[in-house]
Image (cartoon, grey):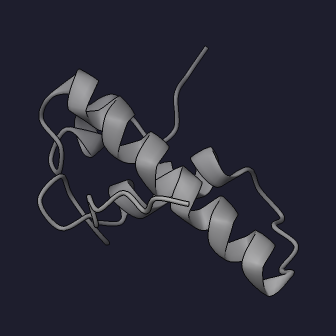
Amino acid sequence: MMLYPAMNKLAEYIPNRYMMVNVVARRARQIAEEAEATGQHLDEKPVTLAIHEVAEGKFDAHTIDTEIEED
C-alpha cells in the first residue's frame, strides 16, 4: 500500500513519527469540532484533511494550537 502524502514529505515539517500522530490527531479534532459547530459537511475525514495540511506546510509541530479546552 502506498501512503499519500509520502512520510518523507510529512517529515519535512514534523520529524518525529510519534509527534506526527499527536499533531495530526489534535488538528483532526479541531477540524471536526469546527465542522460540527458550523454545521459544515466534510467531504473527507478530518484525519485526511489534517494530514494534507501538514503536507502543504500549513502548520508544523510548533505552530499548531496546543491549548486544550475544558468543557
Q: Is residue 68 above or below residue 18?
A: below
Q: Nearer the viewer, residue 22 or 14?
A: 22
Q: Nearer the viewer, residue 32 or 43?
A: 32
Q: Is residue 38 above or below residue 41?
A: below
Which residue is the extreme one toward the bottom? 38
The image quarter in which residue 32 lies: bottom right
Q: Nearer the viewer, residue 21 or 5?
A: 21
Which residue does the image show at 28% across and 66% down from the upper left? 65
The image quarter in which residue 47 lies: top right
The x and y percentages for residue 70 are: 46, 59
Q: Quadrant of the C terminus?
A: bottom right
Q: In the visual, does 23 lie left or right of 63? A: right
The image quarter in which residue 53 lies: bottom left
Q: In the visual, does 63 lie left or right of 58? A: left
The x and y percentages for residue 51 are: 47, 49
Which residue does the image show at 56% across and 53% down from the upper left? 29
Q: In the visual, does 16 lie left or right of 43? A: left
The x and y percentages for residue 39 are: 86, 81
Which residue does the image show at 84% across and 64% down from the upper left? 43
Q: Is residue 8 above or below residue 42?
A: above
Q: Nearer the viewer, residue 52 or 65?
A: 65
Which residue is the extreme one toward the top? 1
Exactly how many numbered labels are in the figure? Answer: 0
Q: Quadrant of the N terminus?
A: top right
